[in-house]
Image: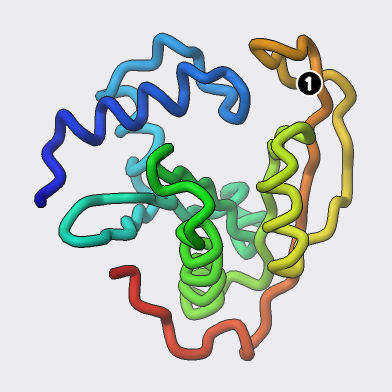
Amino acid sequence: MGCRRRDKRRSGRQIVAGEDVFAYPPETNFEEAQRIWIAPPTRAFVAERDGAVVGSYMLRPNQPGLGAHVANAGYVVSPSARNQGIARALCEHSLATAAAAGFRAMQFNFVVATNESAVHLWTSCGFETVGRLPGAFRHARLGDVDVLIMYRQLDNADRGDLPSMN
């Protein structure tokens, strides 16, 4: 089964509209989300299963100029494909891609602290929490919750063989 543009829109709307992990406004339309996710210098990648897109990540410099040696990435997994190793595969691929592109570290600027599965995954992938922003995210059900800044050095070992995204 192929993944049509409409399918990607529905999946993205479900994730943003949940108001529990992304800071984007719930009314973000597909075109705006696409601009955020793929506008240069951002590079976007997808994970596919049986021809359907089940996840995606974007990779870009965390800051321009003198901060451009640190990567930033964002990940999204289709709700129907969660808890199946997709996010880990996306993270591992992004680390290898970032290292191969010459980035020396990766930083996540806005990890919602109540997203315990993401915090656990990023920690298991070698990220450390280096900062906490109290009440920086307006969670739809829990009110204001903390946001974590997570960071990980990259080295030659991270380059390895890029895992397949299929």
Instruction: Report which quarter residue 165 is drawn in.
Output: bottom left
| Closer-to-camera residue (134/77) | 77
Q: Position of residue 124 (x, y in %)?
A: 74, 66
**Badge 1: residue crowd in 10 Å (few <14, some 14–19, many ≥20):** some
33 with respect to 67 (left or right): left
Q: What's the image's color scheme?
A: rainbow
Q: Residue at x 15, y 45 (%)?
A: 3
Q: Residue at x 47, y 70 (%)?
A: 93
**Image height of 32 relative to 107, above or below:** above
In the rendered image, the quadrant that contains the C terminus is bottom left
Instruction: Report which quarter residue 121 is drawn in.
Output: bottom right
Badge count: 1
Q: Residue at x 38, y 50 (%)?
A: 56
**Image height of 73 relative to 15, above or below:** below
Q: Residue at x 51, y 21 (%)?
A: 24
| Residue receiving disc 1 | 136
Q: Position of residue 76 (x, y in %)?
A: 46, 43
Element carrying mark 1: strand
138 with respect to 128 (left or right): left
- The amino acid beneath tag 1 is Ala
Q: Where is residue 106 in the image (x, y as percent from the top left)?
A: 66, 61
| Closer-to-camera residue (27/121) | 121
Q: Position of residue 91 (x, y in %)?
A: 54, 63
